[in-house]
Amino acid sequence: MNTTRVIILGGGPVGLGSALELARFGIRSVLIEKHEGTSWHPKTRNFNTRTMEIAKGWGEAVYKRLRNVDTPPGWKSPIRFLYSATGEEFGTIDSKGFEGPGPDVSPAEPIMSSQDLIEEIMLDGARASGLVDLRFSTEATRLLKGGDEDHVVLEIKDMKTGAVETIEAEALVAADGADSFVRKSLGLELEGSKDLSHIVNCYFSADIEPHLGERIGVLFFVTNPGARGVLQPLNGAGKWLCQINVRADEWSLDEFTKDRAREWVRAAAGIEDLEVDVHSLGLWKLNATVVERMVQGRIVICGDAAHQFPPTGGLGVNTGLQSMHNVMWKLAAFLNGDAPWSLVETYETERKDVSKEIVNQSLTNSFNVGLISKAAVSGSDSGLSTQEAVRATRRYGNHLGVEFGARYASSVITPDGTEPPSVEDTYSDYVQSASPGCRAPHVQLGLTNLSTLDLIGTHLTLLVGREGEAWSEAAHEASSRLSFPIDCFAIGKAGLTDPDNTFEAAYGVQSDGAVLVRPDGHVAWRKVSGPADHGSLHEAASRALGR
C-alpha cells in the first residue's frame, strides 16, 4: 500500500485546479485520471474573471499562458439569436459577464478559449510544482475506506498493464465528473432535474468567420428547419464547438454521425457549400443538479461530481473552480495540523446554496432560450414575442453578482452587523464590499498594477488603514499564539501608497481600521475603527481556522 497526503480523482479543470491549489500550500497529491491525457475534445471554453483571479495564484507562467490563449477582441459579446449565423438576426444580449467587470473591480481578465488548451497549461503547472504525482490511464476500482473513516483507502488499476494497487491518503478530492465513481460509491444522490434534453457536442473546423463580417460574438443560437442549437467560436480563426439538440432515439454516434454533423453545421451557418472538418463528437444529457452532501467522511466532492449545470450561463467549470478554491485552503490547513476537519465541512455551508442559485438560473436561461426559438418560429402563436423572450433572458451572460458577490455566512465568519450594498439584481449586479463573508475588494495601490488582492497569499492576511500600524504587533501576537502566520499590510507604507484613500472607502474602514482576509480572498472579520484590539483579532483568526 502506498500512502500519500491527498488523492485527487479526475484530471479535468477542477481536478488539475485542486492539485495546483494544494501545491501552493506545499501539499503533495496523487491525481488519478482514467483517460490517457488531458482533454482533446473541448467541452468548456470560459474562465471568467473570478476564476482568473484564482489562476493568478498558480503562478505567473500559468496565468500569462492562459491569457495568451484568449480569443481576439470582440468575441465575448454579444449573444446572438438568428435563423442562421449568416441569416436574419432576431435578438441580441450584451454579455458583460464574459467581457469582465474591468480594472475597477479586478486586476484579472477573463478568457474565452478551448478546454484542451486550458488543461494543457494547467497540467504543465502541476508538473512544474514537483508536488503532484500524475497517474493517467488509471482507473479507480474500489473505494475501500473514506466515507465515514478518518482516512481514505482506494483501489486503482493501471489500464495499460492491468496492475492493481491500493493507495491510502488523509483525504480524497472527488472531481471525477458527472458520472462520479466516488459519489456513487458513497451512495450520494443528486438533487434537481435530470435528463432534460439530449445533446450532441461537436468540435469542428470551418471558415465561418469570413462570412460574418462585423457580426461576431460569443454565442450564435440558431433556429431553422435544418439546425437548432448553438455555435460557439473557440478562437475566432476557424475552430468551433456546437451543441446540437437531438431526440432521444437519435442520441448515439451510430445515429448522429459526422456526416449528419457536417450537414447540421452548414444549415446552422447558412452556407450550403461550407467545408466542415469534424474533429470529434460527444454525447451528454442536460442536468440541473446539486449533490445532497459535498463532504462525507474524509472525502470532498467538487466540480461536476458535486453540481451539474445547463451550459446556458457559462458557469459550470467556473463554479466548480471557485468552489474548489473555497475548500482547498481549508483542506491544507487541516492537513498541516492548523485546523480541525470541521473547517473543511464549512465548504458545504458556504458553497451549496451558491451552487443551487447558479444551477437554477442556468436552467431558467435554458428554458428562456427555448422560448426565444419558439417565438421566432411560431410568432404570436407562441404567446410571447421574440423581443419579450430576449428580455426575459437578460441574465444570460450577465452574472457578475454570483461570480463575485457570494457572501458566506458560516461558523468561521465573524459578522459585524453590516450588509453589502443593495443592488437591483443580485445575480447580475455587483458592488465591492468588505462586509464579513464577502470577497475582499480590489484596490490598486502605488504606481504599478499592484492590487490588494495580490497581498492575499496562503496565510491569513490583515489589511489595515493608513493610521493602523499598531495592528502589526497584534497580528504578530495572534500569529504566535495560533502558530499560524498572519501577514499584515498597512496601506500607505512603502510600495502600498493610496493617495486618494480608496482602500478605506472600498473596505468600509476608517484610517485605524482593520480587515482579516482568508486565503480564498473572502473577509473573515472587520473592525471599522479604533485602537488595535489584540483579543478581538486573536479570537477572529482562531474562529477563521475553525478552532
Image (cartoon, rainbow, N blue to C red):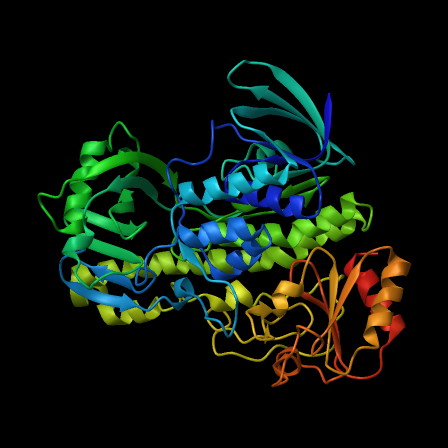
Q: How many marks?
A: 0
In the image, 345 versus 249, the foreground residue is 345
Q: Horizontal placement of 171 versus 162: left or right? A: right
Question: Residue 70 at what x, y percent from top left?
Answer: 39, 54
Question: Residue 59 at what x, y percent from top left?
Answer: 58, 51
Query: In the rendered view, would you say 373 is above or below 20?
Result: below
Query: In the rendered view, would you say 236 is above or below 160?
Result: below
Give the residue drawn at x 89%, y 59%.
480
Q: Is residue 190 visible?
A: no
Give the residue drawn at x 52%, y 61%.
50
Q: Is residue 299 visible?
A: yes
Q: Horizontal placement of 164 versus 361: left or right? A: right
Q: Quadrant of residue 351?
A: bottom right
In which quadrant will I find the C terminus? bottom right
Give the residue drawn at x 70%, y 76%.
491
Q: Horizontal placement of 463 versus 222: left or right? A: right
In the image, 448 versus 384, the foreground residue is 448
In which quadrant will I find the N terminus? top right
In the image, 276 versus 200, the foreground residue is 276
Give the residue drawn at x 60%, y 86%.
500
Question: Residue 453 at what x, y percent from top left?
Answer: 62, 66
Q: Quadrant of residue 474?
A: bottom right
Question: Residue 541 at what x, y percent from top left?
Answer: 81, 63
Q: Horizontal placement of 338 versus 392: left or right? A: right
- The furthest residue to the left: 273
